[in-house]
Image: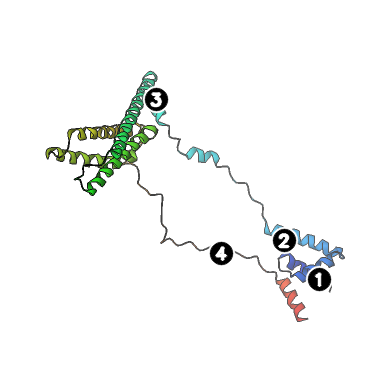
């Protein structure tokens, strides 16, 4: 086999079309033929230049992007300082902090009282013998509610964030309890001391509302202005886009013709 046929195999090797037997044979030929080695180096250089190109210098758009970007939004302390004198600002912040601390301490005490009342109700002796077992269960259920509300008050008192998430449940519970208590009081079906114990719950609820309002920073959107968008999305109707087509490198007609000639021979 002459150098012309070996160079056709080398061309196929550059295109990634040479077989394993052809690869072993051409490596043996290159170890003996200096002319084919020079031809391979030249062909590899030409192939590399044909497949690559020089990337032109791109303009630096960093300054343009930064200039078009919106300025950072100042925090609520900066906005409050812009409209409040320095002395009044510190006085306002200090007074607000003292008020929130007092509300937290009061709510913690009320939570402890409510928790003690619930635990005492659980540990109290059995209700009178004439009370049905269903009434006994309702008594225990009421005690469980008192313990839960007391624990909730303590939880809110120890946290630094606004207790907005507890307000819907507490509002519904307190409103229903107040309506039923008024109805029972009119019908003389409840003792006065029992209504007094409900006062701790009502006062704790009002303090929770005040904390939810006080811990909201100036300038923050209200609950109605916040977009209600769920973070969970179920994608059933979305169809994945098909993969883009890939362009395969062109086949070497010369190498293919050479292999066909060898097969015919």
Question: x%, y% of residue 112?
Answer: 33, 32
In three-dimensional space, the C-alpha distance between marks 3 and 4, rounded to whole angstroms, equals: 58 Å
Q: Nearer the viewer's eye, disc 4 or disc 2?
A: 4
Quickly name the residue at label 2.
47
Quickly name the residue at label 4.
245
Precedes in sequence: disc 3 or disc 4 = 3
Q: Locate residue 188 relative to residue 98 in the image: left or right.
A: left
In terms of secondary structure, where does tag 3 sit? helix
Name the residue furthest top: 87
| Res. 8 visible in picture | no
Q: Residues within 10 Å of mark 4 (few under 14, many from 20)?
A: few
Q: Locate residue 57 relative to residue 84 in the image: left or right.
A: right
Q: Residues within 10 Å of mark 3 (few under 14, many from 20)?
A: some
- Residue located 23% across and 35% down the image: 198
Q: Nearer the viewer's eye, disc 1 or disc 3?
A: 3
Precedes in sequence: disc 4 or disc 2 = 2
Contact, mark 1 vs mark 3 (Cβ under 8 Å): no
């Amino acid at each position: 086999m002459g150098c012309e046929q070996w160079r056709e195999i080398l061309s196929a090797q550059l295109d990634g079309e040479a077989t394993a037997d052809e690869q072993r044979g051409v490596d043996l030929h290159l170890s003996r033929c200096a002319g084919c080695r020079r031809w391979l180096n030249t062909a590899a250089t030409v192939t590399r230049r044909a497949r690559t190109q020089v990337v032109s210098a791109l303009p630096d758009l960093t300054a343009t992007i930064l200039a078009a970007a919106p300025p950072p939004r100042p925090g609520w302390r900066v906005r409050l300082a812009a409209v409040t004198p320095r002395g009044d600002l510190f006085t306002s912040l200090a007074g607000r902090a003292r008020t929130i601390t007092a509300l937290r301490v009061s709510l913690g005490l009320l939570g402890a009282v409510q928790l003690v009342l619930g635990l005492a109700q659980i540990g109290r002796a059995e209700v009178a013998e004439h009370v049905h077992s269903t009434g006994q269960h309702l008594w225990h259920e009421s005690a469980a509610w008192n313990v839960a509300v007391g624990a909730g008050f303590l939880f809110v008192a120890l946290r630094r964030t606004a207790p907005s998430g507890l307000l819907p449940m507490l509002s519904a519970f307190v409103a229903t309890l107040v309506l039923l208590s008024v109805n029972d009081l009119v019908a003389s079906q409840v003792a006065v001391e029992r209504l007094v114990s409900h006062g701790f719950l009502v006062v704790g609820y009002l303090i929770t509302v005040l904390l939810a309002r006080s811990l909201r920073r100036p300038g923050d959107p209200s609950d109605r202005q916040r977009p209600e968008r769920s973070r969970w999305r179920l994608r059933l109707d979305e169809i994945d886009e098909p993969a883009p087509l890939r362009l395969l490198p062109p086949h070497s007609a010369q190498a293919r013709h050479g292999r066909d000639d060898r097969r015919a021979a």
